[in-house]
Amino acid sequence: MAMGRLLDQLLEHVREDVDVFVRHGALQSGPEDARQIRLGAIYPEWLGDAAFAQAHGARFNYVVGEMARGIATPKMVIEAVRAGCVGFYGSAGLKPEAIEAGVREIKAGIAPGQTAWGANLIHSPQQPGYETRVVDLFLSMGVRRVSASAYMRLSPDIVRYTAVGLSRDATGAIRRANHVFAKVSRAEVATQFMRPAPDRILKDLVAAGHLTEDQAELAAQVPVALDITAEADSGGHTDNRSAAPLFSSLSLARDRVAAETGIDGNAIRIGLGGGMATPHGIAAAFQMGAAYVLTGSVNQSAVESGLSEPARQLLARAGPADVGMAPAADMFEQGVEVQVLKRGTLFAMRARKLHALYKSGASFETLDGKDRDWLEDVLGEPFETAWEQTRAFITQSNPKEAARAEADGNKRLALVARRYLFMGAQWARDGNPDRVSDYQIWCGPAQGAFNEWVAGTFLEPIENRTVRQIALNLMEGAARLARAGQMRASGIAVPPSAFSYLPRKFL
């Protein structure tokens, strides 16, 4: 058999144990003067930490991540679960009644007893009471998994969510019914989730009647979260962290926490998200030791996405460099940024200018005529009209902030700018044809890498992009790359072309 053909067969049949003969690194057809090597089977299901899949009832150690404000739709979660993945509903920023409807849709669409799903819980200090209402809703509806995002420190609500699900089994071991996936990009935040809940928070929750003494006692012995998602360079809120240094940092943090607290460090699983868009990224994550991978941006262009078709078409044309940073709507005044799509939209440029005007201390009244005209052109309406609509919303959600803005022109400018940023995301979801240049589409470089990978294949048209086909191809491709790496590590001369995989349609 030709050696090239033998190599192809070894890469294609990764699910089989095979014996090969090698001499001086080259594959041989027989044992003459050659050493025999056994290559163990590699299944996509085996990539990552088997304890993760077992804990969450999944086939693959692969998470279809939440994308806020309903972009990760209930349908996306349902299809992720059916494909054997863990799926998270993008409930962040939605009204509680909308979240409730979404959870009901998910429950109706999956098999009874299926556990591989959850919803997003976002820390929202600028919306007092919102986080509490969402946790109450999750607990009442039996949402057993949350992906916690935007936390810089633990809140009483995230501690309450995990603690009320703790109990002891017949052997005395502590079991948890509620699972927190902590999405973090810094070790100092990750360690808070890796440690048991702070005594102060637990005592306050008991005093308020939110926890029993027994629940608080159990929560003081186990980590707040067993699943830590290292969020590298991603769409939306991001610290633009490189994946390898971030994963290393969190792994070392886990070791330190285990040594300091005596908890079992092996019980804490660290997954990797951000940049997970091609088999190369997936394979590299698992090779580093990631328990699971999480995909985000690539699922936005899928048919189950909450984005409109025009916005998904823009995503499908993006390259790795077609992204940029822009002020975040929820933390505009603090200067926090999100990563968004640049190609085909002027949103990032306009948002940055809005923030520059705010930082200058200006109000609409003190702007020069040119800037006032520019601002009203961007808003698509007179500033006073935009302020009236903004005031109506802020008065309900945060009365103190509304009162401050009445007396502070710079604050009014900030709140109107925040409304524009908010609407940019809404126009992208609705597919407003008159506001394409103002679409805010959260997107990282991974989307461009994915587009390059699928170019010329059946996954290039957006109508063929489903979370199932994306997931199965990424995992199958990662398994094939793992086989190529296995061969190279065994001393076999493997050509660079072996480290490639083109998407194929799975039935």
Image (spheres, rainbow, N blue to C red):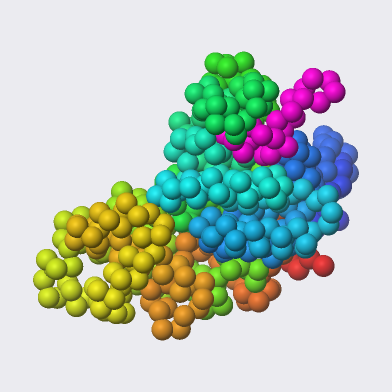
Q: Is residue 452 left or right of residue 43?
A: left
- Of 14 and 73, nearer the camera is 73
Rendered location of residue 27, percent (x, y): 78, 46
Instruction: Say which residue appears at 19% left-offset and 78% top-offset.
Output: 373
Instruction: Say which residue appears at 58% left-offset and 68% top-offset.
Output: 306
Rendered location of residue 243, percent (x, y): 51, 43
Q: Is residue 443 left or right of residue 287?
A: left
Highlighted magenta segment, given as a residue range: 159-179
Residue 91, by quadrant, is bottom right
Q: Quadrant of the C terminus?
A: bottom right
Q: Is residue 274 left or right of residue 423?
A: right
- Of 239 and 382, nearer the camera is 382
Q: Quadrant of the N terminus?
A: bottom right
Number of numbered discs overlaid on the protein picture: 0
Which residue in the rendered view is the most extreme toward the bottom? Answer: 434
163 drawn magenta? yes
Instruction: Say which residue appears at 81% left-offset and 26% top-offset.
Output: 169
274 drawn magenta? no
Q: Is residue 398 left or right of residue 144?
A: left
Instruction: Say which residue appears at 72% left-offset and 47% top-offset.
Output: 142
Residue 453, by quadrant, is bottom right
Rendered location of residue 369, percent (x, y): 12, 75
Rendered location of residue 155, percent (x, y): 49, 36
Can the viewer see residue 472 in this picture?
no
- Of 339 and 323, nearer the camera is 339
Can the viewer see residue 16 in this picture?
yes
